[in-house]
Amino acid sequence: MKSREQEYRELFMAEALEAYDAMSQHMSVLEKRPEDEAALNEVFRLLHNLKANARAMGHDAIGEVAHRMETIFGQIRSKERPFAGSMVPVLFSGIDVLGGMIRAVGANQELTENVPLIENLDRVIEGEEPVLVDDESGTEEDATRKLELSDLVYIPIKKLDHLLNLVGELIIDRDRVLTLAQEIGDTTLQSVTAHLSRLADDLQYSVMDARLVGVGTLFNKFPRVVRDVATAEQKQVELTISGQDIQIDRNILQIITDSLLHLVRNAIGHGIETPGERVKAGKPEIGQLTLSAQTDRDNVLIRISDDGRGVDVERVRRKAVERGLLSRDAASRLNETEVHNLLFEAGFSTAEQVTEISGRGVGLDVVKLAIDSLGGQLRVDSRLGQGTTFTLVLPTSIAVKGALLFELDGHPYALPLMHTDSVVSLQPEKLHVVGGTLLAKVLTENIPVVRLADLLADNDDALPLANRAALVGAQDIIITNYNGRKLGLIVDRFLRQQDIVIKPVSQPLDMIDLFGGVTLLGSGQVCLVLDVPAITRLFLSRRP
C-alpha cells in the first residue's frame, strides 16, 4: 500500500504537469494575441496554484519561480505593462525552467534555484531590461525532449459507482460458483474457483481503494464555517483539526457533510458560551472546538468536541416530560446515556427560542437518520459545564459490509457486524423474567432479550409476556448495539460471518423499514438484511 506522502507526491506531479502543459499552450496564444484576457487570467491562476502546491510540498525552488512569474502576470493583467518586448523570452524561459523542475521532482532529483532566471524575473518586476543570453544547448534540449503524460487520470465518481456495482454483482456470482464447486466436488473446478475468489477479492478492494478520499477534503472547509458562525453568534472560537489523512469512501463523506455542518454549527451556537459567560465560569474567553478523525478497526470515528456548557441532563428530562415523550416517572428512571438518546427524537430541543443557529437537539433526528442510513452510529458524551463530544462511527465503505448470517424459521437473514456486539448461547435457566421481559446477564450487564420471530410477526400489539418455561434447550442470542442500547435477539441458529453486498429491497418490501436491504447467498437463496436501528425502535414501542 502506498504511503500518504507518496500519494500526495503523485497528486502534485499530476496537477503540476497538467499546469505546465496548460501554461505552455496559453503562452503560445499570448504570443500571437497579447490582449487575450482569458489566456492571461488562466496563466495567472495556474501559476498561483502551482506556487501554493509547490510550497505546501516543500518544493520552494518551484514556488519562488512561480511566485515571481505570478507577480509579472499580475502586472500585465492590471495593464501596468504589455505582454511584449524582452519580457516574453524571459517568461517562456521561466515556463521551461518550471517544467524541468517538475520533471526533476518526478525523478527524485534535488532542485536548485536557477539564479540567472530569478535575477531576470526580478529585473522585469522592477521595470528594468533583462539580460538575455542565447542558450543553444537549452534550445536543442527543448527540441529533442520527449512528450510526457501524467501517471494519474481523473475519473468521474459516477464511473466508479458503476464499476463498484459491477464488482458487487461479481462477488455475488463468485459466492454462487464457490458453493456449486463444493457441491459438485470436482477438485479441478474447486482450484479454479479458489483462484477466481482471490482475483475477485483483489478487484473488490482495488475498486474500493480508488473511491477512498482523505477526510481533510471536507474538514478543510470548516475554518471558514466556524469563523462565520462564531462572528454571527458574537463568540470567540478556536478550531483544531486533526486526522485529515484518514481515508473514507467518498460517498460516505458526501452523505455526512450536512450532518457534520449541523453539529459544528450547534456546537458554536448552543454549546460554547459567550466570552462573558465563559469568564464567569472560570474558562478562557476563547472557546475550543475540535474536529478529528481516526480509524478503529474497520470503522472511521469522526468526533466533534467543544468545551462549552454541556448537556443539562435534568433539563432534557423536564423537556421530554413537557413534550409528552415520557411520563415523569419513566423519565426519572433513565440513565445518562438514555437521556442523551432523547436528543435524537424528532423535533426535540432544549432551546427556549428557535433561531437559525438552533439549540442542540433541533435537527439531530435528521443527523441520526443520515448516520443510520450508512449503517453507522452516533454517540454522545457530555459533562455539564465541561463540554460535549459527538462521535460518528462510520464504515470505511458502504459497498461491502461484514455481516453475521443466521437462520430463523428456515430462512437465512443477515445482521451487519457494525451493530453486532456479541453472540451467546444460554440455557433457559440463565434467563430471567422482569416486568414481562426476558433479561440475560452478559458479563456485568443485564440485557433485554426477545424472540426475533415475535418482533417480525405482522402484529402492532404489545409483545407477548415472556415465558421462560416455553424455551427449550440452549438459546442462540445475538446481542445488538445501537446508540448505546443493547438488545438480545433469539434466533434459531447461527450460520457464519461473511462479507456481503447489500442491494436495495424492491417493492413492496421497501415499505418495511425493518429491512435495510437484501443480498444473494452462494446457495442462490435471497437473504434479507435486518436494520438494527428499526428493530430496536420496534422493540421499544412494543415491549410489554
Image: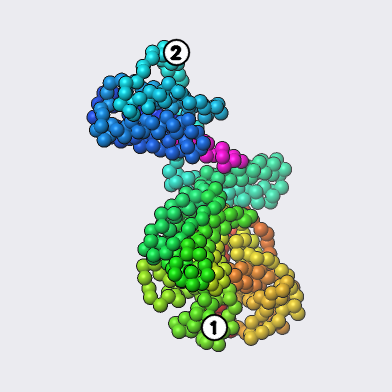
Q: Is residue 367 magenta?
A: no
Disc 1 or 2, which lies upstream in sequence? 2
Residue at image location 30% in from the left, 26% down from the top? 127
- Name the colouring of the figure: rainbow
Residue at image location 70% in from the left, 70% down from the top? 476
276 w.r.t. 110: above or below: below
Q: Secondary structure at mark 2?
A: helix
| Nearer to the camera, 304 or 113 | 113
Q: Position of residue 366 (x, y in %)?
A: 45, 67
The answer to whether 16 appears left or right of 313 in the picture is left
Q: Which residue is mark 2?
A: 137
Q: Secondary structure at mark 1?
A: helix
Q: Nearer the viewer, mark 1 or mark 2?
A: 2
Q: Position of residue 355 (x, y in %)?
A: 36, 70
One can see residue 211 in this view: yes
Disc number for residue 331: 1
Q: Quadrant of the C terminus?
A: bottom right
464 w.r.t. 46: above or below: below
Question: Label 1 amino acid?
Answer: Ala
Q: Quadrant of the N terminus?
A: top right
Name the chief secondary structure element in magenta: helix
**Disc 1 versus disc 2: distance between alpha carbons?**
85 Å
One can see residue 460 in this view: no
Q: Position of residue 448 (x, y in %)?
A: 64, 77
Mark 2 burial class by Cα count in 10 Å: few <14, some 14-19, many 20+: few
476 w.r.t. 44: above or below: below
Q: What range is drawn magenta here?
A: 1-15
Q: Which of the 4 image quadrants contains residue 209? A: top right
Residue at image location 51% in from the left, 54% down from the top? 241
